[in-house]
Amino acid sequence: MAITKIIGAIHPAKSGGRYKVLKNTIDYITREGKTDQGYFVGSMNCSSFTALKEMIHTKNHFGKTSDNPHERLGYHFTISWSPEENISHEEAFSILQEFCERYLGSEYEAVYSVHTDRKHVHGHICFNSVNCETGKKFRYENGDWASKIQPLVDELCKARGYHTLEEDSGVSLDDYYKEHILNKGTNKEKKKKGKYSSEQRSGSDQKKTYSRSQKGHSNNKYYNEKNEKYSHTDYIKDVIDKIIPECSSFEEFIQKLKENGFWVKMGKHIAVKTKGMERFRRLYKLGENYTEEAIKSRILHNGEPKSAPTTPDLDLDKYIFVVPLEYRKFVRRTMTPQEKKYYGRMYYLGKAHPGRPYPTYRDVQRRIREIKKTTEKISFIRENDIKSSAQLQNLIDDAYSEFNEINNTKKQLFYQKKDYRALIDCVNQIKNLYPNGMPERSRYDVAEAYSEAEKNFKELMDEFQSFGLSWEEAEAFSENLEKNMQEGKDALKKIRQRIDFLKEIQDEYKAIEEEMVQQNIPKEKTPQNANRKK
C-alpha cells in the first residue's frame, strides 16, 4: 500500500534569505546521492535545474510577494510504499508523475523524485503555492487528504496491481484520516507522550510547564561528562581521594583542601571552589562517598588494614584477577592574570609562539586533493585559452544542451522499457530457469509427462512466441536496452561533474574580474572583443 503524507507548507526563512527553506527542500528532493545520480528526478511546468527561479518569477509576475513571515511559499508531499509491496523505483516514479499530472495539472510548477537510498521506496513532491496561469494561491482544505489526495494515489496503485490503503488497513479513508492525520500532534497525544506537564493550560496569559527531562543541558559539567573530558567534578574527587589517607581528623581534611587551592564554605553543607569555577560546588552532590558523614568515616578507618577475601582450596590457575591501578588524568593549570599578560607580551615580541601540531593524515589528504584540483583547473584554462567568465558561460550552456539531449534519449529508453516490460520479464524468467543455455524445444513437444520446470518453460515459450521475435532477437534487444540505459546514466553523471567543475572556475573568474574593476585594471582583449572592434 502507499501512504501520502503532507509534510506541510513551506514558509519564509528567518535568516539566510526569504526562499532559503524552499531552496533547501528542492535541493534535498533532487540530491544526486538519493536519486541514482538524478535518474529518478522529474519536473512539471518547469525545469528541475531552474525550478526555484521559475517559482520566484511566477510569484513576482502576479505580485504574490509580501513581508508576511507566515506566507506559504510552497508545499511538500511524500508518497511511501510498504516494503512488502516490492514496487520498483521505475513504477514509483511513474505513479508520482501521473499523480502530479492529475492533481496539479498545468497550473502549478512542481519537482518530484524517487529516493533510492532507503529500504522502503518513497518519493517527494514540492510544488509552488501560486498558480502559474491564474496567479491564485493553492488552497488546501481539511479533508482533502481523504477525499482527493489519497484516493487518487490508491487509484493509481490499484491500476498497476498494488494494494490500496483501505485494503491493508481495514478502515475507511475517513476513519484513517481522523485517527492518524487529523489528530496527529494534538495536545492530548503530546500529554500522553509526556511532553507537557500534569495539566494542559489554555489561554495566552498562562504559560506551559514542561517536564524536567525536556530541559537542555547548557552547563559545562554536562558538556564535559558527555564528551568524556576532565571536568571540575573529576578534579575535586581526585584531590579528596588523595588527601583523605593523609588526614587524621576532619579539621585536618578542611585545612588540606585550603592548602590545595580550594576555597571552603562551611554551613549546612560543605561547598568548595577552585580556580576556573564560577560557583561553589557542594560535596554531597559529588556522590555518596563524598558526603560529610562518608568523609569522616573514611578518615576514621584510615589506619585499619583491609582484609582480603579468603578463598579456601581455590585453584588460582583457573581464575583471572583484576587489580585496580590508580590513574590520574592530566590537568592543565589555569594561568593567573599576571602570567597571561606576561605571555601576551612575549608573544607580541616574537619570543613565544603557540604550539604548531603536526598535520593529521586527513589534513594531508585534503591538501593533496586541493592541489590536484587546482592543477586540473590550471590545465583546463591553458588548454582552452580561457580569459573571461563569458567563455566559461558558453561552455556551461553547451554542457547543459548536451545534458538535455542525453536526458531526452534516456527518457525515451525508459518509456521503451516500460512498453516492452512483458517481453523483458519473460526473457529474464527463461534465463533464470536455464542459465546455462536454451534447451531444444522439440524435446518438450513430444514428452508425455512434464516436470514442474518443463511445464513452466513450455508456458513461457508459448507466451514468448506471441511477441513474434526469435530468441536471439529478444535476448539482444533486452541486453542492448539495459546497456544503453546504463551508458546514459554514466554520461549524465560525467556531464554534471563537468558543469560543477566549470561553475567553480567561473566563480573564481568573476571574483577576479570584480577585483579588477575595483582597482581600474583594464581587461585583456579576448578574440571575440577584438573582432567586434575591427
Image (spheres, rainbow, N blue to C red):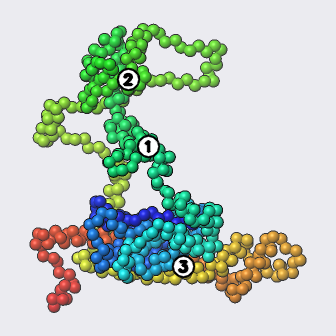
In three-dimensional space, the C-alpha distance between marks 3 and 2, rounded to whole angstroms, equals 71 Å
The residue sitting at the bottom extreme is 534
Q: Can residue 97 be seen in this view?
A: no
Q: Is residue 44 visible?
A: yes
User: Which residue has dot 1 on it?
Assistant: 199
- Up-down relation of residue 465 to residue 97 (above or below): below
Q: Considering only order in the chain, which callout, 2 or 3, is on the residue closer to the N terminus?
A: 2
Report helix, strand or loop for mark 1: loop
85 left or right of 264 in image: right
Which amino acid type is marked by label 1? Answer: Glu
Residue under pointer 2: 284
Quadrant of the rendering where the N terminus is positioned = bottom right
Question: Are circles 2 and 1 on residues that touch, CB within 8 Å?
Answer: no
Q: Foreground mark, 1 or 3?
A: 1
The residue mark sitting in front, 2 or 1, is 1
Q: Depth check: give the residue in front, 279 or 382.
A: 279
- Kindly state the secondary structure of the residue where label 3 is placed: helix
**Residue shown at 18% from the left, 70% from the top:** 514
Q: Which of marks 1 and 3 is nearer the N terminus?
A: 1
The tag on residue 414 is 3
User: What's the distance in space between the residues labelled 2 and 1, CA to CA?
Assistant: 34 Å
Q: Are marks 1 and 3 in contact (CB under 8 Å)?
A: no
Callout 2 secondary element: helix
Q: Considering only order in the chain, which callout, 1 or 2, is on the residue closer to the N terminus?
A: 1
Under mark 3, the amino acid is: Phe
